Structure formats: structure tokens, C-alpha cells
Amino acid sequence: MNLPETAASPSTPAAVAPMAPIVILGGGPIGLVCALLLAHRGIATHMVDARPVEALQRDRRLLALSRGTLDILEPLLGRHFAPLGEIHRIHVSSRGNLGSAQLGSADFDGVPVGATVWYADLVEALARAAQSRPLITVQRPRRVLAVRQKVLGVEIALDNGAVLTGPLAIDAEGTPPLARDAAQYALLAEVAVRCPPGDAIERFTSEGPLALLPLPADTRPGTAGRMSMVWCLPAGKARARLALSDAELCEQIGRALGSRVGRPTAVGPRATFPLLTHRLAQVCEHRVVHLGNAAQSLHPVAGQGFNLGIRDCLCLADCLAQAPLAAPTALLPGDDPLAALHRYASRRRLDRTLFPALTDALPRVFSSTLAPVVLARSAALLGIDLLPVLRKPFTRILMYGAPR
């Protein structure tokens, strides 16, 4: 469901009801993680989503989780919460240019720098954990008709005639509709290619970055020896390659990967999705705060979009936990957490500025054919690969985000 237009009514005070939980709009992974983090801090939430959880569990997207995201999820869900495809090494290179970099767990005592997980498996684990928390109330399927802001709280009108009240609302609805055509698309497929276990590939080409990610170690038939491919391409080329035969597409992928990786021997069904990015300048609108893709959506290069959203959740939970709450499950009229939203917006500013800028710049820089740019990026890759003083801080930012 899409978040309805927010109506602010500063001239009509409405007292926040005692024991009112925070309302979360959206019950996907970001909404569920936010609810669990708040429950862990003794703060009650009421989550609303138009989709039954079974609909989410039919989604077979692959998510890339950074080390920092794993460190947030494991205390909530347990160490082995879902089948994962561990990432120990990330090979970064540019087609036709000298220099490459290898980032990985060797710099971090062998700890995986990240992992992949099926969206459906993560939702199942999160939904199961939320069901066991008495501080989390979930209404599915239930559509939000209106969000009305008051001086001291919010009112959420539902399609069954009910009205929820709370001190604030968290918008975790995902990417809002974007009324424009995409200039670029991501071409998705599973490919059979020779890569050591735990390796991920980020290969920059003149057309756009091509990533190969290890698949989770699950029992789905036909996944042995395969990796997930995400190739970002201009819209016309993405459509043309979607229509190629398997042999022709394997040839195109192998040409882009070059001899460093080798040619794929098979390719599975493929699909495309549009690459549309956005970033809200203000994540807080009075008593509504936007998280995850509702606040920003990134280019998939470096796989940072979902991880940025998880860091949104952690920061907001920490800020709300610092609010002067009189009781662990109640936000009373005298205990207004509105100031926590101002702290949240301030603390998230650097991370939310750095990663959109980085993921927007990388494809542009690596697609340039200007000689000074080519020399500079080759030197940068060599420097990162050879110098731990450069490599480790860069890898740490990819793992944990910007320091705050």
C-alpha cells in the first residue's frame, strides 16, 4: 500500500492517549525490524500493512546484507535465522583498465563482510519473531486511508473504520510511486560461473556495473554452482539482452566479465526492473518519520540500499529509547518523543548523504572514457588493493556505514 497524503492540523490539539503505541505504516522487512528494535527497548508499536505476510513470502528477491546489518539482525532473530550466502571477498575491477581491488574478511579476522538472503526467508524470520513479542501488534491485511497529524499526536484512519492514535507514525512503506520513465534498468538472472565459495564480483563496464553475488546455501534445486547477477544497463540495452537466447546472453556476460572471472556456462530465467532513485531532503514531517526506501532509494551498485534502511531503524530506535518515557510500554501525554525525531534526522544526515552520493557517482566515474579519469580510477583501485590504510577504512564503511 502507498502512504496517503499526510494532513497536518496544528491548530487542533489532540492529546496523546495513555498507553498509545507508536504506529508503523508498512510491515515489510524495514517495518518489522523497526518494530523488533523498539520492542527490544521496551517501546510498543502497532503495525499496519495491506498485504498478508504470505504475499511477502512469495517474493523471491535476493537481498545483500552488510556485516553491520547482520550484527543488528542476529540479536533479534538468532545466529542462523535463515539460509545465507556468506560473502568473504569482494573483487572490484573495471573492464579494459588496469587495477583491481580485493576487499574482504582477511582484514577483519575472517569474519564475513556480508551475506545474501532471500527476501521471503528474511520476512518469515522477522514475522515469526514479531509474533512472539507482546509489545508488537500487527494488523494484516489492513489499508490506511488517511494520516492526520495533530499538535500532540497522529490519527491513522483504517479501511475498517478504526482510528489508531499515537505520539508519532513511522513510514516504512517502501519506495513511493515515481512518475517518470527509467533511463536505466537492472537485468537480473542466475548464472552458472566458476567462482570460489564466498566470492562476490563487482565489475564495472562502460555500459554499467555488473555484480555477481553468491546464492544462499539452501536446498532449492538447480542453484548449485550458480550466482545471482545484477547488470545495470541503459533501458534499450537491458530490453535487448532480455530477449537474447541463453547462449547469446552467456556470451555477452562473459565478454563483460573478462578472463578474471571466466565465461558463464548457463543462465537461468531473467527479468528487469527500473532503476529509479530518490532521496527526501527532510525525513521528518512533524510527527511522521520516513525510513528505508520511503526516505531514499539507491542505485544497486555496492548493494547498500537495504542496509541503509536497517541503519535508519537502529538509529531511530536508539533515539526514541532516549526519550523520557515514564513507563516501558506507554508513551504518556507528558512524555512527548517528538524531540527524538530531531535527534534522529541530525544523526542520519551524514550516512544518508554519503551513500546516495557514492552510489550515484560510481557508475558515472567508471563509465567515463576520459584519460585522466581512467588513470585516476586505476590508481585508486591499485591503492585500495595494496594499501591496508586505504582498504580497511573503505571496507569498514561498506560494512557499517558512515560513522555517527
Image: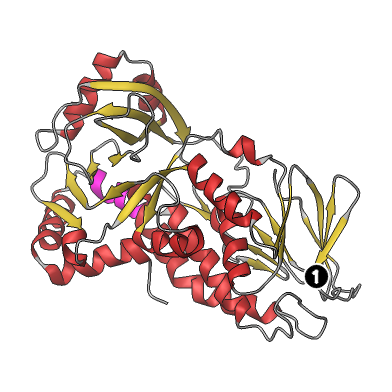
Pick the front one: 18 or 76: 76
Q: Quadrant of residue 129?
A: bottom right
- Asked whether 119 falls inside the magenta stretch, the response is no
Which residue is pictured at 34% across the width and 22% down the height?
268
Magenta-highlighted residues: 360-367
User: Taken as a whole, is the magenta stretch helix, strand or loop?
Assistant: helix
Q: Which residue is the site of mark 1?
A: 20
Q: Is residue 213 left or right of residue 326?
A: left
Can see residue 35? yes
Give coordinates of residue 181: x percent, y percent: 53, 35
Q: Is residue 322 left or right of residue 96?
A: right
Can see residue 295? no
Under mark 1, the amino acid is Ala
Which residue is pictured at 15% across the width and 50% down the height?
374
Pick the front one: 60 or 207: 60
- Asked whether 362 falls inside the magenta stretch, the response is yes
Give coordinates of residue 316: x percent, y percent: 57, 71
Position of the N terminus, as image quadrant, is top right
